[in-house]
Image: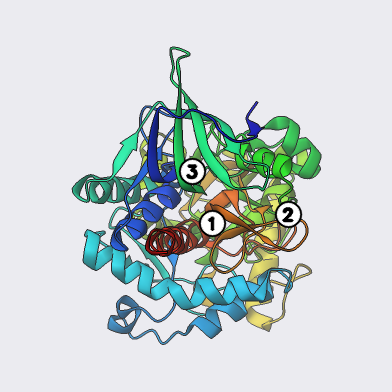
Amino acid sequence: MPIVAFGSGEAFEAHVPLVIVGAGACGLVAALAAKEYGMDSVVLERDALPRGSTSMSQGFIPAAGTRFQERRGVTDTPALMAEDIQRKNGHQADPAIVRALTEASAGVVEWLADAHGVPFDLVEGFLYPGHSRMRMHATPRRTGEELMGSLLNAVEVAGIDLLTEARVVDLHVDDGGRVQGVTLERPDGSREAIGCDALILACNGYGGNPELVARHLPALKDALYFGHEGNQGDALLWGEAMGASLKDLGACQGHGSLAMPHQTLITWAVMMRGGVQLNREGRRFSNEHGGYSEQAAKVLAQPGGMAWNLFDRRIHQAALEFEDYRNAHIAGAVRTFDSLEAMAAGLELPLEALRETFAEMQALAESGRADAFGRTFSSEDLLTAPYHAIKVTGALFHTQGGLEVNTQARVMRQDGGAFVNLFAAGGAARGVSGSGDSGYLSGNGLLSAVVLGAIAGREAARQLSCDSAA
C-alpha cells in the first residue's frame, strides 16, 4: 500500500527538478509540456512497457476550434464544448476547470501535432452521445495504442528521462505539506529515493482496486474491469493521507459494449449509426443514444448481465474503420444472419419478441415519435438484412473522481488552499464528469489526461523557473 512519509531531512540518492508519476498519455504530455518551458523531468512508470489506460482506449481527444475541424467545415467553440460537457454531467463539474480545459484543448492538440508529430485527424461520420459537434481527434488507426506510440516517440526525441519498472511506493512530504521526493521500488525489491522540487501525479484512478470500487462505485462492484491493472488508487490514497480535497469519487466511465468472451471494445459508433441492443428476451431495454458510460449498468442489469449489439451491413462496413472492431470481426465476435428467423434461432431469442421489436422500430420511424426510452428512429437508419450481432457485457473502464485541482492543476487542500508543489491530472484528478456514471461525455478521460496534463507540466515548469529566479 502506498504511504506518505512525513518529516524532513531525508537523504535522497538523486535529485531532479520535476518528478512525474505515471507514463500514460497524461504523464508523457506533462513531461513534453514541461520540456517546452525549459524544465527537465523524469517520468516514473511501474510497468516494463508504458501503456496505461490510454492504450486500452480508442485514443479520441475532444477539442474545439482546431484547424482539423476547420478543414472539414466544422464550426466549434470552447463555449459550445463546455456547454455539452456541463449538460451531460448535470452541471456538477467545476465550471472553471471545464472552461480551462475546453479553452486550451485546440492549442494542445495542434501543439502535439506540430511540435511532436502526432498524426491527428478529425473523426467524422457521426456524433457521440452528448456532443453537438464533431470534435474527436485521433490518430489514423483510431487506437490508444497508436496514440501512446506517438507520444513515446516524442518523449524519446525530446530526450526526456523515462524510467520503467519503477513503481513509486512512498511520497516524502515535510510537515508543511511540501513534497520533498519519492521512493521507487524495482521488481527485485530494491528501492531508490529521488528528491524533487515539484511532483505531478499522473497515475490514473482506482478502477483496479476492488476495495475502493466497492466503496465508491457499488453498482459496478461486480462489473468486469477493463482498465489498466495498475490503477490502484495510489494518488487517491496519497492525497487522503496528506489532507487533500477529494471530489466526485462516484464518477466513472463505464461502457456498455465489451464483446464477450473476446473482451474487445466495440465502438459506440455502431449504436449512433442506427444499431440497437437487445436482451435475451429479444427486447430493447434503453435509449442506446443516451451514452455508453451509463449503459454499462443497464446491460449488467439484464438477464445474465449481457446483451446483443444488433446492426446491419451498412453499419458493419462503417465500423471497419476502427481497428478494435476489425480485430473483433477477425476473432469471430461478429455473427451474421440473413433473416430474423435465422437470427432468432442462432442467438436463441424468441422469434415473436424479435419481430415485435423490429415492428416497433418501423412504426416509430413512420410516426416520428420517440419510444418509451426517448429514442427516435429514422427510415434511413432502420436495420435491414443481413443482420450482424455481437454478444456484449457492461464494464468499468476507469474512474473520474479524485484529487480536487485548480485551473493550474495544483492539488487542493481540504481547507481550500493549494499544495505548494503538488500537481495532478488525468485519472488522478477530479474530472469533468460529475458525480456518477451518467455524466461521462465521450472523450472526458483523455481530455483530462492530455489537456490537463499539458497544463500541469506547463505550470510546474513555470513555478520551478520562478523559484530558481527568486
Residue 51: % across, % down: 40, 38
Q: Kindly identify the amino acid type of the residue bearing the numbered disc 1.
A: Gly
Q: Secondary structure at mark 2?
A: loop
Q: Disc 3 or 1, which lies upstream in sequence? A: 3
The answer to whether 371 appears left or right of 427 in the picture is right
Q: Disc 1 or 2, which lies upstream in sequence? A: 2
Front residue (pair 22, 408): 408
**In this figure, which residue is indicated by the disc labeled 1?**
445
Residue 413: % across, % down: 71, 56
For residue 53, the mark is: 3
Protein image colouring: rainbow
Q: Kindly identify the amino acid type of the residue bearing the numbered disc 3.
A: Ser
Distance from label 2 to label 3 (Cα)? 24 Å
**In this figure, which residue is indicated by the disc labeled 2?**
245
The answer to whether 109 appears left or right of 361 in the picture is left
Q: Are marks 3 and 1 in contact (CB under 8 Å)?
A: yes
Residue 244: % across, % down: 71, 50
Distance from label 3 to label 1 (Cα)? 9 Å
Q: Secondary structure at mark 3?
A: helix
